[in-house]
Every structure is written in C-alpha cells, then in structure tokens.
Amino acid sequence: MSDRSPWFYLTTPIYYVNDIPHIGHAYTTVAADVLARTHRLLGEPVFFLTGTDEHGQKVWQSAERHNLPPQVYVDRILPRFRELWEKLGISNDDFVRTTQPRHVSGVRDALARLQEKGDIYEGAYEGWYCLPDERFWTDKDVEEGLCPECRRPVERISETNYFFRMSGYQDWLVSHYESHPEAVRPESRYNEVMGFLRKPLGDLCISRPKSRVPWGIPLPFAPDYVTYVWFDALLNYITVPRSTGATPDDGLARLWPGTHIVGKDILTTHAVYWPILLRALELPPPRMIFAHGWWTVDGQKMSKSRGNVVDPVGLVETFGADATRYFLLREGQFGQDVDFSRDALINRINRDLANDLGNLLSRVAAMAVKFFPEGGIPRPAGGGRREVESESARLLPEVVSRTVSLEFHRALATLWEFVGFLNRTVDLKAPWVLARDPEKAAELSEVLYDLLEGLRLVAVHLTPYLPATADRILEILDCPGTGALSLPVHGTFGQADAYSPRPGAPLFPRRDASGALLSDEPERAPRKAQKERASSSDPSAPASLPSGGQDGSSGSSPAGQEKPSPAPAAPDAPQITYDDFSKLRLATGIIREAVAVPKSKKLLKLAVDIGEPAPRTVVAGIAGSYPPESLVGKTVVVVTNLAPATLMGVTSQGMLLAATVPDGVSLLTPDREAPPGAGIR
Ligand code: ME8
C-alpha cells in the first residue's frame, strides 16, 4: 500500500461514553475541525473522523451503576456527544461507534489475521491492573501501588489471557522514529516516546475473560474472551476507512495513513502500540500523531470530585460556538497545558472579538453605506501596491502555514495582527475626513475598498476557526458564503470586483464581568445607538465608546479630531499592557495661538508649544466649549506621537486630552505650573 494517499485523513480520539463530554473533548475536536477545514479550504480531499469508544470495563461499570444494559446506557450518552459536535459546528465526515457492525467485523478480521500469523498467543498473566486506564502493569512499572500513568491505585490480577507479540516489533519502531522525527509531535512528545522505547517492550495483553468483563468484542478464536478495549478502539482508525470503499482494501488504500490528534494522556497507546499493530497487519504507520496538553481550571486538575469540570455545552449556550472555539485555540499553545478561567474567556470576547474584529467591521460597513449609499465601491484600477494588499500578502500566508502545523494560537495572533493593522488604517486614513472633500472622492473609494477587501480576507482566513462568524462577515460584505470558498482562489487581495455592504447586528456583543450581555450594546438599545451615530462625524464610531478610536479605554475624550459627541467611558474597556501604554507619548503644551477653522462649527486651529523649536499645529474639536481667545496661554496635555491627520484641509500634528462633561469638553491641564514639553507618565 502506498503511504502517500492524496487524502488528508484526520482523526480525534474516540471518546469513552461512560460520562458526558467535557471541555477537554471539545478542545481536541475543535482543533481537529480547524485543521480539517483548513485542508478543505486549501482544496485537498479531507476525511475527518471522530466517534465514541463504547466497550470495556469502565463503560460496563458505569452502565451497571445506572442499572442499565450497556448498549442502552451508551445509546443514552451518545446524543450528548453528537449534540455537542453539532453545536460547536464540527464538520466530521463520519462518526464511528465501536458497537457498529462495520467496526466489530473489522476488529474480528484483524484479530483473525494476527492469530493466523502467529502474532497472538495464549498465556498466563499475573500482575497489576489499572481499572480507570484499563491497562496492565508489571511489578517494575508500579511504585507504591499506583498506576505509573494516572497515579491511581492498581489492583493485583491473575488470569489466562491472549497476548500480542509486541516486543518483536520494537527495533522496527525505533528505527522508524529515528528516520521520521516528524511522526510524533510536538518535539517534547517525540522525545518522551523515544525515552519510553529505550526500555524493552513487553507483549500486550489483548483480551479480558468474559467472566470479568462481559462487554466487548468476542475474540474470533476464543469466544469466552472479549477484546481489550484499547486494542478494539485503536482499530477504529482503519475499520472506518475499510467501510468507505467498494471492498475493505479499496477503502483502506484510499484513506490510510491517517493523522491523529490526541491528548498527552494517550500518547503511548497511539505512538507505540498502534504503529506496531499496524506493522503486524502489514499497513504503514500513521503519518503523524500530535499529542496536545491538558486543560486545568484555575490552575487545578479538572475532576468531578472537585466539581470544577467545565461543561462545553454551557459555554456554547452562554457565549456561542465561535467565541468558545476562538477561546479554546487562542488561549494557549497547542501542545502545552492551558488554564481555563471565565475571566480570560470574557476578556478575549470583549477585546479580540467584540472590539478588534466586531467594531472594525461595524465601522467600515457603516462608512461604506453612509458615503456610498448606492453601493458599488469598485476595485481601484491600476496603481501601485497598496498597504492593505502588501500587509495581507505578508501576514495571511503565515496564518495558513501556522494552522497547518497546528500552531493555532500563533495563527490567530497573526490574523489579529492584520485586524489591528486594518483598525489603524481606519484611524490613519480617517475616511470621514476624506468624505468632506469632494476632491478626495477617489481616495475615499480606494480606502474603503481596501478596508472591505481586507475584511473579506479576514473572513476567508477565519473560516476554519469561526465558521459562522466568517459567514456573517461575508454576508455583511455581500460576498459569496464560506461554502464556496477556496484559499487558492479567494485568499489573495483584489478578488472582489466591487463592494455594496449591508450592515448587520454587531458580530460579538460585549459582556460584563459575569458574562452577561452588556445592556448598552447597540443591538439592545438600537434607537440610542442610531441617534448617537447620527450625531457623529465618523458614522462608524461605536455608540458606547468615547471618540478616541477602538477601545475607549480612557475617561478623557481626545479633543484633537472632530469626532462624536461626548459619551461615557466604556465600563468594560479592555485591559492594555504596560507595553501598550508605553507607546503613548504625552507632554504638556502651552497654547500660543488659537483661531477657528473656516467653515467648521467645531474645529479650532491651535499653535501649541511643546518645547520643540516651533509650535505644533493641533486641530481640536473644542470650539463649542472654548472661544479661541480664551485658550491662549493655557497649559494643556498633548498626545505627541499620534500620526498626523488632515481635518478640513488643516493637518493636525497632535491631539489634546479633554474630559467629557455634560455641556461639552473640559481640557485637561496640570494642577501646578509645568513647562512646555514636560513628559507625562
Ligand atoms: O482515552 N484537557 O477516551 P477519553 C485536554 N477512549 N484534553 C482532554 C482533557 C483535558 N483535561 N480530558 C480529556 C480515551 N481530553 C479513549 C481513546 S482512541 C483510540 C481511544 C481529551 O474519553 C484528550 O483528547 O478518556 C484525551 O486524549 C481524550 O479527551 C481522552 O478521552
């Protein structure tokens, strides 16, 4: 069999149905979903499999505790998994249950083949057994009566069983991994597996007497025994492909070898037992096994006894599927352990999703509609490479390459770097200022096209991560939906001929600290929002924020540019780091001259001395609060490193800080004499 099938065959673990799903199950499955969707977007044929592990002692004991026959019990738990995957938008192509006839017959075939080959023998077993892991251990593995894997107590067991000759394949596996270090990832897990393989491998007990564990697939050659649950479960990765072809061999040849995403708890079974089992069946080893880290909760292990198990259904119902998917993959590095906290989730929603992405889309779409009510903002003809285009070419291929190598958090950080760039472009190009000058109509159209096209590219690259959000962005942009997308066709700048966006409700409503929707969110108070927007020169400014820009984190209202009327500071302004803050340069300045800007009711043109050889020109929207002559000699606070912006034909080289007060603005001023240019910290 060729080990280069064109198919990208991807699997998650099949989860035990002895309990309902939790956030760890959601994590692995969402990660696999993002990878599967990305490969589809790249135009590859993808087969994405998940499912449930329904046999074995653990499931049987849970059924006993519920007084139900095991099949009835698993049938009752199963919908909880299926519903969760549906809610989370998981795009699996098949769903395997180990109780399905296709799987049972595949397992029995494999057992019969191995027995015929002489790879299975009957033997007596005496040793330690870990019930929760359903694994046998030898005396040298067990210290202080605890399972070396999960640290729970083991029990002594003595019985006749069937064994798989694993030890004979150890040298082959070591040399396979030596020549394929990429086959187990991340590197730390590869090293772990190589360390494990330095010790001699024992043979694997692959049966349980029916008298002790009655729930499993009977051995074809020994009907009083059932198959060990791990041996049964691992085979799902090939019993399903076998069921997809005209013959089992056709199906297998089409899809195998596969790529497995698992948690670090089941690394050995996947990276040691499984390739050996495949080798014995004369099949190639998996292409790659990626073992990710563990979710803890507020620094603690998740467990029922601690009562801290995070319910993914609750998260999706409260915060939505896309916010949950984003948080799971953005919060930590895939491969390392990650800690869950509700505060961190709410912060991510407010900062990254509502503020950075949601506001950007609302602002750009609102401006496009206001300045081009007829729509049809065309792709600019010719011209040099524009900034949005070159920035998209720099950042977006990296989003894809990081995703394909399972560096999800870095892929998202890079995509958000592009979102941040688009936000800065809105502020710098100030389309609402261009809109006032008929001579700038062409520039306005170009700026808006670039921003809309940038947003389309954000949606395309967001598709694997936040599929519903990507669809909504494309709907607002009036572009074809995600179903029709392909990265090679739609993933580069300049694909759309023209834009006629249709603004919709905000993508992600903001949350208060408890996770509840904020009551002043625009869609909850549409009339207020519309009124405030109507009074704004920047039609896109978010209604609940001060005029400074994206986040409104300051209680002072920047007065250097003509912006919306005063609004209260956002109560849930996102946190910024000291690094963010330290980018800001503030200094005292003394106003030397002040005159009205012709034809403007709000703007004053000021000459402000900030200790430089010549005063700076600052245009401030404070005419309603200060007659020009009252300002001369006044000491004010100036943002000195703001990129220049042209307002009503005058270029402003800074911005004054002012508090919003009921009847206008009140300039900030030091409370004792300060020389011009004094730094502010
Ligand atoms: O082991 N953090 O099933 P299982 C991150 N049936 N991921 C977690 C997690 C956590 N706290 N808890 C669970 C089995 N997971 C076998 C697999 S495959 C042939 C048979 C995820 O229900 C992670 O992917 O115990 C882990 O490997 C898997 O759930 C274990 O699921």
Image: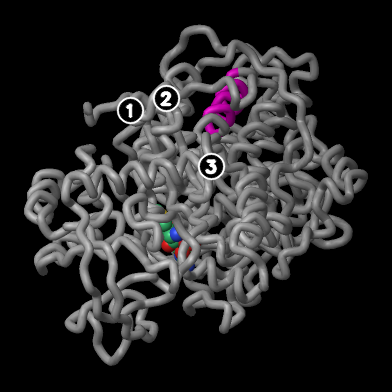
Numbered disc 2: secondary structure = loop
User: Can residue 618 be seen by looking at this rendering?
Assistant: no
Left or right? Give the position of 63 relative to 539: left
Figure check: 301 above or below 654: below
Locate residue 577, reporting x and y percent: 49, 64
Counting residues from the start of the chain, the first of labels 3 and 1 encountered is: 3
Q: Is residue 519 magenta?
A: no
Name the amino acid type tagged 3: Phe
Figure check: 343 above or below 145: above
Locate residue 249, reporting x and y percent: 33, 28
Q: Name the residue under label 2.
A: 245
Quadrant of the image for the N terminus?
top left
Q: Name the residue under label 3.
A: 95
Residue at the image position 45 percent from the left and 43 percent from the top: 103
Left or right? Give the position of 421 relative to 157: right
Name the amino acid type tagged 1: Asp
The 10 Å Cα crowd at callout 1, few under 14, some 14 to 19, many 20 or more, is some
- Part of the protein shown in magenta: 446-458
Q: Mark 1 points at which residue?
A: 249
Pick the residue in front: 506 or 331.
331
Locate residue 590, reporting x and y percent: 60, 59
The 10 Å Cα crowd at callout 2, few under 14, some 14 to 19, many 20 or more, is some
Numbered disc 1: secondary structure = helix
Left or right? Give the position of 69 relative to 293: right
Q: Does the residue labelled 1 lie within 8 Å of ligand 1?
A: no
CA gap, disc 2 and disc 3: 16 Å
Residue at the image position 9 percent from the left and 44 percent from the top: 179
Name the amino acid type tagged 2: Gly
Residue at the image position 83 percent from the left and 46 percent from the top: 523
Label 1 near label 2: C-beta < 8 Å?
Answer: yes
Pick the residue in front: 326 or 209.
209
